[in-house]
Image (cartoon, rainbow, N blue to C red):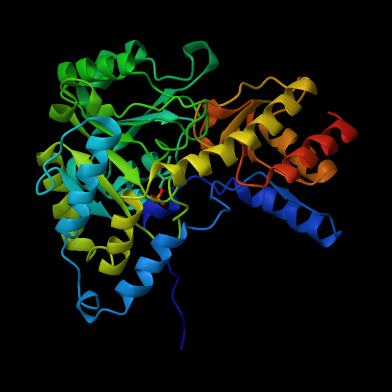
Amino acid sequence: MAGFPIQPARRIKSLPPYLFAAIDAVKQKALARGMDIINLGIGDPDLPTPAPIVERLKQAAADPKNHQYPSYEGLLSFRRAVAAWYKRRFGVLLDPTSEVLTLIGSKEGIGHIPLAFVDPGDVVLVPSPGYPVYPVATGFAGGVAHLMPLTKKNAFLPDLGAIPKAVAKKAKLMFLNSPNNPTSVVMSKEYFTQVVAFAQRHKIIVCHDAAYSEIYYDGRRPASFLEVEGAKEVGIEFHSLSKTFNMTGWRIGFAVGNRQVLTALGKVKSNLDSGVFQAVQEAGIVALQLDDAVTDGLRKIYQERRDVLVPGLKKLGLAVDPPPAAFYVWVAVPKGYTSASFTAHLLEKAGLLTTPGNGFGQAGEGYVRMTLCTPKERLAEAVERLARVGF
Ligand SMILES: *Cc1c(COP(=O)(O)O)cnc(C)c1O
């Protein structure tokens, strides 16, 4: 039987080219040569999920009442645990029945929210460099992403004053991300206050991605967007258990805040997915109730790693600041290099796998991203190798 040309939809064909394909080719070649590669590329915790969470999953998985479809909005007991955690961590009060929505990882909610609010041609404000899901999900809904460049000049914060009035007028949503991937920069409450005023003025729904709120250093805890006055009137916050509790494989997160926004997101979800396995939600409750000593231990490990890698890079003459939060190190490439050529140099000569900054948007050109998801001995070796090969 003759086939016919299989044609993907325009929304798929117009996806940006896979920037990492070229790196992958170089990586495969290096591996084939028998090179030992130090992975500074992945943003996925290398440490295991704390044991009490795993134990709870085992029990809950054996309970037949968890074998059926879960409720769309999530177990009330999980949403109550979220509200209790929010009160304890941020001093923010949430109604678990209307201001908390369980997600299949925060990526799921971020990916779906434009479908709830964006009509074809609507503008969505997106930080760049940034998590690629923001612009892609915008495009899938027929929206147009307006990029807000994060540059050294504006301290890697979106310059709200630089957004043209006509664009702000057409904008339906704004994505923000603090602590930030890939720059690790943290937004202050003062900054969030400006965001609320901007959103009120232009009737823009704020979607704040707080996936890294619990990965912080020197005891300086990042704020929640919802801590500032009026935030709940203009937006929601996405959270994830992935990075906080080394649970990236489990697929559980949540959104909190404005109930009308959450209702619309829930409507999209109930038509596309059927919620999170209840046994995973039961384990998620245990995670949210863990003693802070557990997450303190994880933060200590990341901080030790940061304090090996960053001073090491600095000593070699690279322009890099110690991140205040998240597990990313945003390194300016040395003179004579681009993001792509420095990434290739690091990989070919030193066996260091990093991510070129422009992979997160054109404004990331001139940087590479390194991650702290590798033991400190390997990070020390990464610095030694780089000292040997130079740049
Ligand atoms: C990892 C990450 C997420 C999503 O993680 P989930 O596992 O889907 O909860 C969201 N935002 C940013 C910026 C991330 O880096």
Which residue is pictured at 75% across the width and 58% down the height? 28
Which residue is pictured at 24% across the width and 47% down the height? 82
Viewer-proximal residue among 290 and 112:
290
Q: Visible in this render: residue 119?
A: no
Which residue is pictured at 42% across the width and 65% down the height? 54
Viewer-proximal residue among 19 and 383:
383
**Quarter placement of the C terminus:** top right
Rendered location of residue 156, percent (x, y): 48, 20
Task: Please tell me whether residue 113 is drawn above or below residue 3 in the rendered image.
Answer: above
Rendered location of residue 360, percent (x, y): 52, 36
Name the image quarter holding residue 34. Answer: bottom right
Viewer-proximal residue among 37 and 347:
37
Task: Please tell me whether residue 103 is drawn above or below residue 391 in the rendered image.
Answer: below
From the viewer's perspective, tell me whether residue 23 is left or right of residue 81.
Answer: right
Rendered location of residue 368, percent (x, y): 64, 33
Name the image quarter holding residue 60. Answer: bottom left
From the viewer's perspective, tell me whether residue 122 is left or right of residue 249.
Answer: left
Name the image quarter holding residue 62. Answer: bottom left
